């Protein structure tokens, strides 16, 4: 493991002994609803095991009753639009309810892959070349200026929803149409051959980088949540200097977007040792396949300890 890693700080003794009223939000209306239901269930079970008073609720634009339930802190275990794009965060800010994760502005920026890429690029960090396509682009053009292969994905979704690698010219339009029809815009991004690396941030500390090696064509939805053959490696043969760079640059991306408490930063490490920023996730998954819990476990931090620390961070940092 890179020498720059350290364990996220623990809460003070007084807070660590306190029983909190915690609302866990899960589900939501996005394409990542199923993952969110699983994440929320795991988070709630972990907090209950620590003796906290946990209220679990689904939520949606027309289903906000959960926010009226008395709570010391809210844990939004929500992924995708509405739950991760700043909407729920803004509602919680307006009600002055402490919550785990990035504030509304940082959440909105992180969810918008284009906005996040532009900000991180200002730090001098490389990101794959990209174009944004919509219905007008589809009417005007047949090919991107970026040479194939390219990755086509929605601008504002996670979990590899509607994501395709396009290697042949005839496959571009169908892939873009799927993303545009469902989510209005498609990101057409330079394909980087190599390994996907991911770095979790808890508090202000980076967790050990994980190399993800799926047995499928790429790290798609099935590889993330269903395929037991996907490998998660802490020692995949990368130079320590590259892992240290991934750690340092993840912190810079986290700070540049003004995240807090928690995030996961995704990278591609190419075959020449280059590192390319893909995206930052402000509410990464908390399922059995999820990467932040795996990285925390590498440092000896149990799932229950990780989840409770995040709750304490939210309480401690609320004025």
Image (cartoon, rainbow, N blue to C red):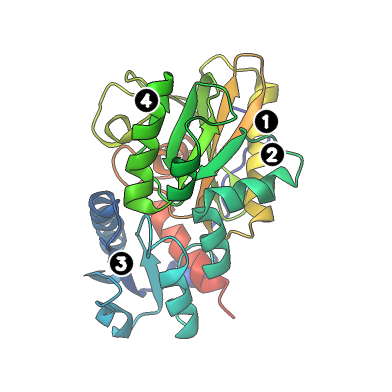
Which mark is nearer the camera, 4 or 1? 4
Q: Secondary structure at mark 1?
A: helix
Q: Are marks 4 and 1 in contact (CB under 8 Å)?
A: no
Counting residues from the start of the chain, the first of labels 1 and 3 encountered is 3
Q: Quadrant of the N terminus?
A: top right
According to the picture, the residue beneath numbered tag 2 turns out to be 248
The spot of residue 82 in percent (x, y) is 37, 65
Which mark is nearer the camera, 4 or 2? 4
Estimate the spatial distance between the alpha carbons at disc 4 and disc 1, rounded to whole Å.
37 Å
- Residue in the picture at 27% in, 61% down: 44
The spot of residue 52 in percent (x, y) is 31, 69
Question: Which residue, as the protein is rendered here, is positioned at the far front?
Answer: 140
Counting residues from the start of the chain, the first of labels 4 and 1 encountered is 4
Q: Secondary structure at mark 3?
A: strand
According to the picture, the residue beneath numbered tag 3 turns out to be 25
According to the picture, the residue beneath numbered tag 1 turns out to be 244
Q: Quadrant of residue 21?
A: bottom left
Estimate the spatial distance between the alpha carbons at disc 4 and disc 2, rounded to whole Å.
37 Å
Q: Which circle marks residue 171 in the picture?
A: 4
Q: Quadrant of residue 61?
A: bottom left
Q: Nearer the viewer, residue 224 or 241?
A: 224
Counting residues from the start of the chain, the first of labels 4 and 3 encountered is 3
Q: Is residue 240 left or right of residue 202?
A: right
Q: Secondary structure at mark 4?
A: helix
Q: Is residue 294 above or below residue 106?
A: above
Q: Nearer the viewer, residue 218 or 143?
A: 143
Q: Residues within 10 Å of mark 4 (few under 14, many from 20)?
A: few
Q: Which circle marks residue 201 in the picture?
A: none
């Amino acid at each position: 493991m890179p020498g720059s890693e350290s364990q996220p700080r623990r809460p003070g003794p007084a807070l660590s002994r306190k029983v909190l009223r915690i609302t866990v939000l899960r589900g939501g209306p996005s394409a990542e609803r199923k993952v969110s239901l699983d994440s929320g269930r795991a988070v709630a079970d972990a907090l209950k095991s620590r003796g906290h008073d946990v209220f679990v609720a689904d939520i949606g634009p027309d289903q906000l009753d959960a926010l009226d339930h008395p709570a010391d802190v809210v844990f939004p275990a929500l992924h995708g639009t509405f739950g991760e794009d700043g909407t729920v965060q803004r509602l919680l800010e307006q009600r002055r309810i402490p919550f785990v994760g990035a504030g509304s502005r940082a959440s909105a920026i992180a969810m918008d892959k284009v906005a996040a890429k532009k900000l991180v690029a200002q730090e001098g960090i490389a990101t794959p070349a990209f174009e944004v396509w919509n219905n007008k682009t589809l009417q005007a053009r047949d090919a991107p200026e970026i040479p194939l292969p390219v990755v086509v994905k929605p601008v504002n979704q996670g979990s590899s929803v509607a994501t395709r690698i396009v290697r042949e010219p005839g496959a571009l339009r169908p892939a873009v149409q799927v993303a545009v029809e469902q989510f209005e815009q498609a990101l057409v991004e330079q394909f980087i051959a190599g390994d996907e690396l991911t770095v979790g941030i808890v508090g202000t500390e980076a967790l050990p980088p994980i190399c993800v090696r799926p047995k499928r064509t790429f790290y798609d939805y099935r590889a993330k949540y269903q395929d037991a053959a996907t490998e998660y490696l802490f020692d995949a043969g990368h130079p320590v200097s590259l892992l240290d760079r991934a750690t340092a640059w993840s912190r810079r991306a986290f700070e540049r977007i003004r995240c807090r408490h928690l995030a996961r930063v995704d990278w591609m490490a190419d075959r020449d040792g280059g590192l390319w920023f893909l995206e930052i996730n402000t509410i990464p998954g908390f399922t059995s396949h999820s990467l932040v819990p795996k990285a925390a476990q590498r440092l000896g931090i149990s799932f229950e300890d990780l989840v409770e620390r995040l709750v304490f961070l939210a309480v401690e940092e609320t004025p």
